[in-house]
Structures are given as structure tokens and as C-alpha cells.
Image: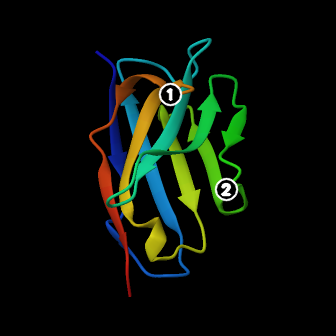
Amino acid sequence: QVQLQESGPGLVKPSQTISLTCTVSSDSITTSGSAWGWIRRPPGKGLEWMADIHYDGSTYYNPSIKSRTSISRDTSKNQFSLQLTSVTPEDTGVYYCVKGIDWSYDFWGQGTQVTVSS
């Protein structure tokens, strides 16, 4: 069973950067054809796709936040990470790492709450 586990700070100040890491077990982020990504749910709102990184290292971003978002990976640790810069309280929410693509996600992390507040 593939497992994904998010880690990162739960509280970030406005204008700073959210940095999250997803550790994957029982699968490899370089498995041919695989895709890995980040999704978030702001309070009282629906899920929002943020970014993907594919097995070959190619990256894809939600255009609405692309200028503030970076997804990367560390293959030696079987981890992938998300950075979201210049955050505001509107970036508060639960952040999930996932395996899959185009809203067809096989596995989800448990989610991590990130609050943007001074």
C-alpha cells in the first residue's frame, strides 16, 4: 500500500513562504508513468489542484498560483516538495499530497493544516 505523509510548519506569517514535503513509501516517485502532486482545501471551499511533478521530473502548475508556486523532488529520499511564496491568509487550508493526475488520485496523504496568520 502506497503511503504519503506531509510535513511542514502549521503556522506561517503573511508574506512568508509555505514549504511542505511529502514522503512516499512503498512506491517510487520515479516509477515510469507516475505523477505526484499537491492539492489544498481552503476553509469552507472546494479542493484546489496546485501542482504536479511527474516521474521524469516534468512539472505542471495551476495557472492561478503559478507565479508563487514551485514543486521539486529529492529522488534519493523519495520525497517531493512544495513551496508557495508571498502567502496571505487566503492560503490557509489543509494541504494534501497525492499520487495520480487530473483528479484521478489513487492515494492521498492525511493532509496537513497550514494557517497563515501574524
For residue 100, above or below residue 51: above
SS at circle 2:
loop
Answer yes or no: is residue 8 visible. no
Q: Percent from the top left, x then y, of residue 54?
A: 63, 27
For residue 107, above or below residue 41: above
Query: Mark on residue 64?
Result: 2
Q: Tell me the distance, in whole angstroms, between the alpha carbons under discs 1 and 2.
A: 17 Å
Residue found at x 61% / y 13%: 33
Query: Mark on residue 52?
Result: none
Q: Percent from the top left, x then y, of residue 109?
A: 32, 36
Give the quarter of the image for residue 26.
Answer: top left
SS at circle 1:
loop
Residue placed farthest to the bottom in the image? 118
Q: Percent from the top left, x then y, of residue 39?
A: 46, 44
Q: Percent from the top left, x then y, of residue 35?
A: 57, 24
Residue placed farthest to the top in the image? 32
Residue found at x 61% / y 11%: 32
Taking the image as shown, residue 47 lies to the left or right of residue 59, namely left
Q: Earlier in the sequence, mark 1 or mark 2?
A: 2
